[in-house]
Amino acid sequence: MASPQQFVLGTFADPAGGGAYPGLVSDDHVLDLRTAGPPLPGPPAGGLTTRVLLEHWDAVFPLLGALAGRAAAEGVPVADLRVLAPVEPRQVFQSGANYRTHVIDLAVAHRAADDPRDADRVRAETAAMMDRRAAEDLPYVFVGLPSAITGPYDDVVLPSWCAEPDWELELAAVIGRPACRVDRDAALAHVAAYTIANDVTAREVVFRPDMPAIGSDWLRAKNAPTFTPLGPWLVPAAFVADPRDLRLTLKVNGEVRQDESAKDMIFDVARLVSYVSQTTTLLPGDLVLTGSPAGNGKHWGQILRDGDVMEGSITGLGTQRNRCRAES
């Protein structure tokens, strides 16, 4: 059986008005899947979304491959449409402290003023801690809010209360088949696609000084509206040979700030999906964010400001571009 022609999926809207709809993208043209035919599994055409497609992924994927050749001839240019976040997940799971170099850099940057250790000692102790985490095989995952998601080209609103807004480019795995207590070896079979996420963070409230014994405040640090730009595309997992063989690059105002291979992950996509599934059931359309590499703003001594532009790209997954806007 011939391999399907490569394509990506997205969610789009006509700038002149009208509702959002799922589209197949090939050769920079979008084929409206509500009217492409033959009928796709799921509700009537008006209710078709990328999440519905993911719910029927095993049946849908070969049908989409057969449609890919029609996009250039029948589709609308991407440039003529508004590109929205590619999927609306029910659940968002975020991996913390999953890139070795990133965690070491953060440990140095967050070192207290009265800490007697020098930077080299902090780096050595943190590196040893990360090695222990890898050996113990215990990821760290917390829950994010879908309401923080925004489109790949939308503005990121910096709240008036946020003193240190920071960037964190991440690879996101998008679930197709429901996953409940799956083994690591079977986990990738439940991943339908990959996309790009930027886990914008209010860095100053990650650790609450009023409750140091409790730990991190992920609600306030991570979940303000627009703090998770997503997309532009859902790239089918079948077209990503090895999710660790990807490079994450983020620029702020044209200057490279993050540029790292996914090989620096402590726990790979399969381990994270398996780990989350031991506690809860992953559903089609859900996101598993896999952590951010070294080079966040805290490392550079830089925060996001009104007018800053972030450009995040991952090998083969496209590029998102978001302008920061101070809350009015």
Image (cartoon, grey):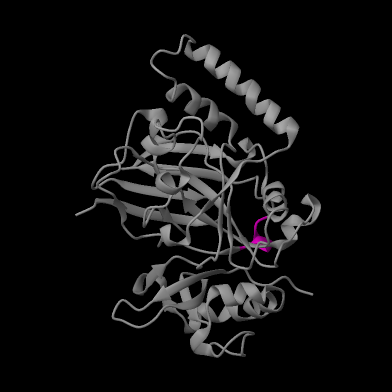
Q: Quadrant of the C terminus?
A: bottom left
Give the answer, above or below, for where 125 lies relative to 239. above
Q: Quadrant of residue 91?
A: bottom right
Q: Position of residue 226 (x, y in %)?
A: 37, 57
Q: Is residue 7 left or right of residue 320?
A: right
Q: Residue at x 50, y 68 (%)?
A: 88
Q: Is residue 298 left or right of residue 239?
A: left
Front one among 42 and 91: 91
Q: Main secondary structure of the magenta part?
A: helix
Q: Is residue 98 left or right of residue 58?
A: left
Q: Is residue 239 magenta?
A: yes
Give the answer, above or below, for where 326 lies relative to 6. above
Q: Residue at x 48, y 10 (%)?
A: 118
Q: Position of residue 104 (x, y in %)?
A: 54, 26
Q: Quadrant of the N terminus?
A: bottom right
Regarding residue 200, the answer to whether it shows in the image is no
Q: Position of residue 264 (x, y in %)?
A: 61, 35
Regarding residue 246, the answer to whether it shows in the image is yes
Q: Which residues are magenta?
A: 236-240
Give the answer, above or below, for where 284 lies relative to 70. above
Q: Position of residue 287 (x, y in %)?
A: 57, 58
Front one among 181 and 185: 181
Q: Residue at x 49, y 10 (%)?
A: 117
- Extreme-left residue of the structure: 328
Q: Residue at x 66, y 41 (%)?
A: 139
Q: How many numbered markers are drawn?
A: 0
Q: Is residue 87 magenta?
A: no
